[in-house]
Amino acid sequence: MPGIDVVTFGETMGSLRSAGLIRLGGAMSMTLGGAESNVAIGLARLGHSVCWAGRLGADEVGEFALRTLRAEAVDTRLVARDSDRPTGLLLIEKRIADISRVAYYRAGSAGSALDAGDLRHLFDQTPSVMHVTGITPALSPTAAAATLWAVDAARDRGISVSFDVNYRARLWGRDAAAGVLATIARKAQLVFASDDELSLVATRGEPAAVAELVNAGVAEVVVKRGALGATAWMAGVEASVPAHVVPVVDTIGAGDAFTAGYLSARLDGLGLEQRLERGAVLGAFAVSAAGDWESLPTRDELALLDGAAGSTIR
């Protein structure tokens, strides 16, 4: 098989967005949800070759997920179909203007049954980067073991490991998560975290946590600060960029969009500040419309934010 830029894996689900409060019923629309598939789509939109691996149920939601990924030019040849378990679901409601709430229906799902056997061909395409998140090991003991196996296998093959901490309190507690997430972080070349996630992968808070990760062998540490921008450290150099100011419609998926932008610029061989800037650009696109990934740009659209607000391209 030909070489590929990035491989990633995890759980992808049907994402049902409510027009109002879930408790009141009403209309819902379905799209695709999942941190790793969000990153895969973001990278594919920018012209990178990306493979997503995971388990989907042999059901209609699984068909929808597979169809959507393929339509977005994500390689799905390593997707396994599970006839015994359903594809997971998540429900999203906007509780007030700028706060959304998520309910998971993923216990016993096909994605939670991921194991190392599902990933045995993950490196056949000689990827440059393997991207993982802290969500996958939270799904089940087999998914945790599969994640750790993949990280070690990538390192043995000289493949860069990108790790987004992505802690989800509704999936596991901080005490249970910390040991696993810290282990993965110390085996990664690139670690993404929000400022409140650093304490899960290091024994001290920022900035000492960054130094601790660097001393453990992490080459790049990126701290995502939402509306306050982002900061990264690499080879003794620190760089920061502000977030782009755009009307905010929906913040879900913004962190994944940032990660996709940063990884894209890294694959393009750009410098640290340019990596952060592309991440900030994709984050701005993500928050400016509803959906985790639907509004993410193509490579030709990366410069759109340079235009004047309210302008029309003719």
Image (tube, rainbow, N blue to C red):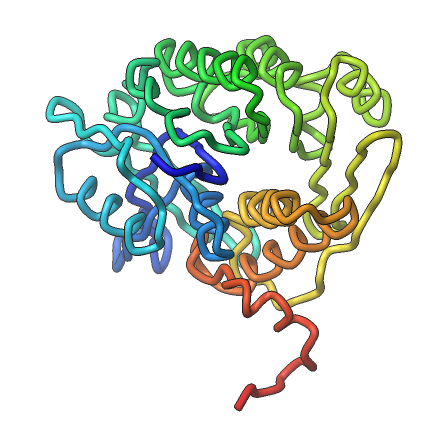
Q: Residue at x 43, y 24 (%)?
A: 136
Q: Position of residue 127 (x, y in %)?
A: 48, 32
Vertical side of 19 occupied by 261: above or below: above
Vertical side of 233 occupied by 39: above or below: below
Q: In which quarter of the image is residue 149?
A: top left
Q: Which residue is more in the foreground, 18 or 208?
A: 208
**Which of the image's four quarters has the N terminus?**
top left
Q: Is residue 12 left or right of residue 137?
A: left
Q: In this view, does 232 lie to the left or right of 131?
A: right
User: What is the count of numbered marks?
Assistant: 0
Q: Residue at x 53, y 10 (%)?
A: 176
Q: Which residue is more in the foreground, 20 or 193?
A: 193
Q: Where is residue 105 in the image (x, y as percent from the top left)?
A: 30, 32
Q: Residue at x 33, y 46 (%)?
A: 15
Q: Where is residue 195 in the image (x, y as percent from the top left)?
A: 73, 32
Q: Which residue is more in the foreground, 216 or 61?
A: 216
